[in-house]
Image: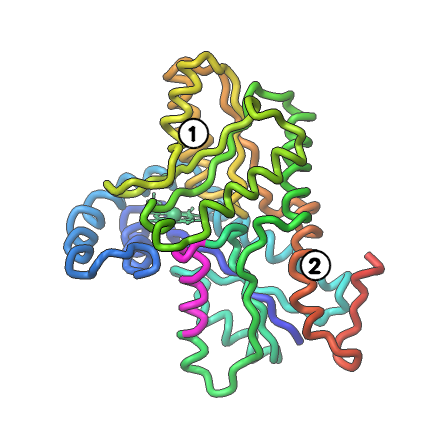
């Protein structure tokens, strides 16, 4: 049996200051996320950040919370469930899908143990980030390695590093934008916004910005957009350092001032909608744009559990488990799909 462990960032358990504080403490203590010497970072984190940010951040979460919970969790779980169903039909019950979070629950140690106990002797780890960053992808690898360190009988392991150029991903994005245009009409400009990173991460060798740019280039090519019909930006700055530019919020203001009236916004780096897309872009970004003179900003949902994406995602993952395929233990029926 092959275990596929989808891993996303993690999210607070409730839209309250105390739950957000617990979440931020774990997240922002990760050395892959904040690469400052502890002696400098510790007092800042435990002082102003964990004092003031949780309440403000909790309000942001409250504005987008779903009846079933945090959107990041709800959509990631729906993706995992949809993928399990798809695999049961197309891969003869040989693939078991699970979802874990890098921070909080369901935890990586718990889900890795469950997969192992249910007879998965092979494990494919799939960070739910199309573009590689040390802060996200490598952090998941670190945690997986920590868990393996405590296991006697470790599984055979593979990890997907990124899928930022995969034709199935680009096609799924392009289809979701085209579908959006069919249903809602087409705005003057397509804003393509990725989560930011400190500029220093790039100087230290992170391929993240380049991967975002390649995804954008392939997407606008697939959509047949001209240069003046799209703009690529980076959102979610944190702290005082310089982050990747152009910034999404400043760009929205500038576009409105230049006379752009309608924007469709897409966040291709997020597999699941979350506070950064539903609050920061669809609510706050819209407000910024309208306050600066824009007329409409419409957020195009992430791929989430879109059935087209579930099929496309299985095409991205399948080569990794077919690598393990042997005639005796794995009757693949993928071609019959
Ligand atoms: C130093 C800070 C941060 C780095 C570096 C960073 C990189 C990074 N993050 C994502 C994806 C997500 N981030 C999310 C939330 C979030 N991110 C940071 C900080 C950094 N991110 C904070 C403090 C928060 C929490 C919200 C807030 O208080 O503003 C989320 C959403 C989580 C949710 O619960 O909905 C995602 C997803 C990527 C892809 C990335 C590097 C490329
Ligand atoms: Fe983040
Ligand atoms: Fe944010």
Q: Position of residue 202 (x, y in %)?
A: 38, 49
- Give the residue displayed 61% in from the left and 49% down from the top: 165
Whether pointer 2 and pointer 1 mark residues with C-beta atoms closer than 8 Å, the reply is no
Residue 273 appears left or right of 222 = left
In the drawing, does residue 24 fall left or right of residue 219?
Answer: left
Residue 192 is inside the magenta segment: no
Which of the 4 quarters of the picture holds residue 254? top left
Mark-to-mark CA distance, 2 and 1: 33 Å
Quarter-of-image position of residue 239:
top left
**Magenta-colored span:** 133-145
Which quadrant is the C terminus positioned in? Answer: bottom right
- Mark 1 is surrounded, within 10 Å at the Cα level, by few (under 14), some (14 to 19) or many (20 or more) other residues, namely some
Outermost right residue: 336
In reply to whether residue 140 is colored magenta, the answer given is yes
For mark 2, what is the residue? 85
Residue 7 screen position, x and y as percent = 50, 60
- Camera-nearest residue between 287 and 214: 214
Residue 148 position within the rendered picture, expressed as x and y whole percent measured from the top left? 45, 78
Residue 186 vertical placement versus 91 (above, below): above
Viewer-proximal residue among 293 and 131: 131
- Badge 1 is on which residue? 283
Q: Would the CB of label 2 be found within 8 Å of ligand 1?
A: no
Q: Which quarter shows the N terminus?
A: bottom right
- Figure coloring: rainbow
- Ligand 3 has an atom within 8 Å of the beta carbon of the residue at disc 1: no
Taking 16 as reference, is 234 left or right? right
Determine which of the numbered discs, if any, sits on residue 320 in the image. Answer: none
SS for callout 2: helix
Examine the image and state in which quarter residue 85 appears: bottom right
- For image coordinates 52% across by 82% down, the residue present is 154
Instruction: Please state the horizontal and vertical placement of residue 258, each as a whole percent of the image.
Output: 43, 14
């Amino acid at each position: 049996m092959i275990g596929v462990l989808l891993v996303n960032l993690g999210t607070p358990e409730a839209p309250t200051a105390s739950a957000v504080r617990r979440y931020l403490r774990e997240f922002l203590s990760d050395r892959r996320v904040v690469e400052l010497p502890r002696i400098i970072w510790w007092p800042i984190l435990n002082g102003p950040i964990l004092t003031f940010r949780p309440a403000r951040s909790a309000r942001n979460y409250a504005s987008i919370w779903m009846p079933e919970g945090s959107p990041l969790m709800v959509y990631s779980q729906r993706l995992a469930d949809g993928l399990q169903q798809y695999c049961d039909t197309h891969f003869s019950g040989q693939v078991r899908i699970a979802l874990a979070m890098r921070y909080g629950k369901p935890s990586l140690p718990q889900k890795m143990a469950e997969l192992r106990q249910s007879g998965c002797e092979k494990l494919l780890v799939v960070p739910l980030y199309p573009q590689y960053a040390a802060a996200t992808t490598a952090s998941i690898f670190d945690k997986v390695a920590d868990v393996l360190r405590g296991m006697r009988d470790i599984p055979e392991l593979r990890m997907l590093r990124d899928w930022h150029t995969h034709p199935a991903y680009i096609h799924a994005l392009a289809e979701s934008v085209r579908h959006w245009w069919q249903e809602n009409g087409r705005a003057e400009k397509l804003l393509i916004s990725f989560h930011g990173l400190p500029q220093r991460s790039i100087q230290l060798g992170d391929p993240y910005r380049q991967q975002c740019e390649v995804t954008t280039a392939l997407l606008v090519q697939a959509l047949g957009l001209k240069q003046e019909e799209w703009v690529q930006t980076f959102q979610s700055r944190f702290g005082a350092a310089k982050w990747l530019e152009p910034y999404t919020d400043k760009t929205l203001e500038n576009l409105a001032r230049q006379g752009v009236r309608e924007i469709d916004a897409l966040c291709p780096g997020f597999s699941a909608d979350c506070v950064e897309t539903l609050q920061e872009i669809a609510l706050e970004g819209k407000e910024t744009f309208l306050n600066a003179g824009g007329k409409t900003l419409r957020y195009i949902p992430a791929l989430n559990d879109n059935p087209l994406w579930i099929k496309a995602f299985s095409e991205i993952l399948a080569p990794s488990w077919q690598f393990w395929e042997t005639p005796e233990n794995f009757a693949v029926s993928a071609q019959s799909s």
